[in-house]
Image (cartoon, helix red, strand yellow):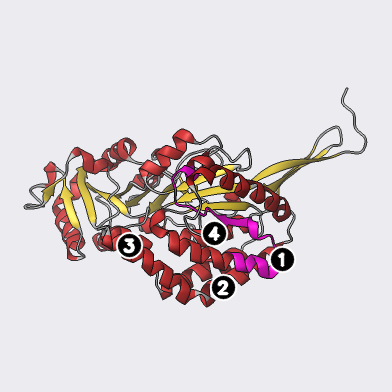
Amino acid sequence: MLDQVHKDDIAAVMRELGTRARAAAHKLAIAPTETKNQALAAMAREIEARAPEILAENEKDVAAARANGITGSFIDRLELNDARIAAMADGIRAIAALDDPVGKLIAEWDRPNGLTISRVRTPLGVIGVIYESRPNVTADAGALCLKAGNAVILRGGSDSAHSARAIHGALKAGLAETGLPEDAIQIVPTTDRAAVGEMLSGLSGNIDVIVPRGGKSLVARVQTEARVPVFAHLEGLCHIYVDKSADLDMARAIVVNAKMRRTGICGAAETLLIDRAAAETFATPLIEALEEKGCLVRVDHDMIDYARDREEASDADWTTEYLDAIISVKLVDGISGAIEHIGKYSSHHTEAVIAEDHEVVSRFFNEIDSAILLHNASTQFADGGEFGMGAEIGIATGKMHARGPVGVEQLTSFKYLVRGTGQTRA
């Protein structure tokens, strides 16, 4: 049960989770695709069937957050409703419909000595996922890891503990229905932060990779303390650059959607950059469109002529992931100025350019080093589901192994299969 683990017992409990996960991972690695898909289908059905229970548990989390004075954007990330529960179930079904990456042939070639070498995908093993307020991550991470043949240990934040436990119950029931080991998807039974430290230690070698999904402080702790590889999901300090060649109506629609569709997700735009050459035409309409939707606009001092009586942005605004209805706006000297600003302040998550000039788009794509770059589209498309991956565990902003949305393919490694006919090496 939740938080019934005594502090002195946390290390032992976590080691046991690791041992059980490793045993489950061995079975999952050879589980037939059909069996995994049947389990995923059962999980989706269980989530739908348990919707009233999940919503009741979620209300406990939401009520506690409101009592603690948590911001509206945080509540938006935390709160579930019928539509979001249906989306969780649909996401699991979408994962089931994906090709199974395990055993997939990546490359094959013959050597002059007659050896045939194949590179095939294989599960990573045991994945530890540490996340904060989003209860849907419980379903997404559990389903993705299962499809890729991995066992997973989930550690959600204390703010969403009741919701995560209820969702985990549905996933566990789906596993049991199809005979797969229930230890394939485990949830840490305590919100004590010491459990995170145990996971970062690797649980006696039983965790193969850690995926953190949360704020800057969580990711910083994971990167500092982890003794196992990390798929880093750094903050989403996302930019939109509107070039002088942009279509204003398109720019207005994209900017408003990128900021205001859901302000609390990592793909929400936080900084708007406007080509100085188009300031007279674009600045006021774009700012007013954002304000009409309830967005607080903070402007660079160069924009006072176009945005009187607005808050002036400070240096800190260019490095702030608001996750709220706030955006900072700056004039830049064309594409070169946009590239310079993004290069200085970006978290390398997602950036968008709105332009009709092909040379501008080419420079944006070639010279900006972020995981996801978009042309004439909202940054809110930075999502594994929108990429056709069914769902994602997170957006990896590093460069090793996985980058961008982390889906089933990114949750695999590979091994080489070498076939001979009696060859020996001289």
The answer to whether residue 348 shows anywhere in this view is no
Tag in front: 3 or 2: 3
Q: Secondary structure beneath disc 1?
A: loop
Q: Position of residue 307 (x, y in %)?
A: 10, 52
**Residue placed under numbered mark 4 in the picture:** 389
Residue reaching furthest right? 422
| First reached walking from the N terminus: tag 1 or tag 4 | 1
Asked whether, in this view, residue 109 is left or right of residue 197, the answer is right
Which class describes the residues within 10 Å of circle 4: few (<14), some (14-19), or many (20+)?
Answer: many
Q: Secondary structure beneath disc 2?
A: helix
| First reached walking from the N terminus: tag 1 or tag 2 | 2
Viewer-closest of 297 and 378: 297
**Residue placed under numbered mark 2 in the picture:** 46
CA distance for labels 1 and 3: 37 Å
Residue at the image point whose x is 71% and y is 62% from the top: 33
Q: Position of residue 382 (x, y in %)?
A: 42, 55
Q: Secondary structure beneath disc 3?
A: helix
Task: Return the mark for residue 179.
Answer: 1
| First reached walking from the N terminus: tag 3 or tag 4 | 3
Q: Quadrant of residue 101?
A: bottom right
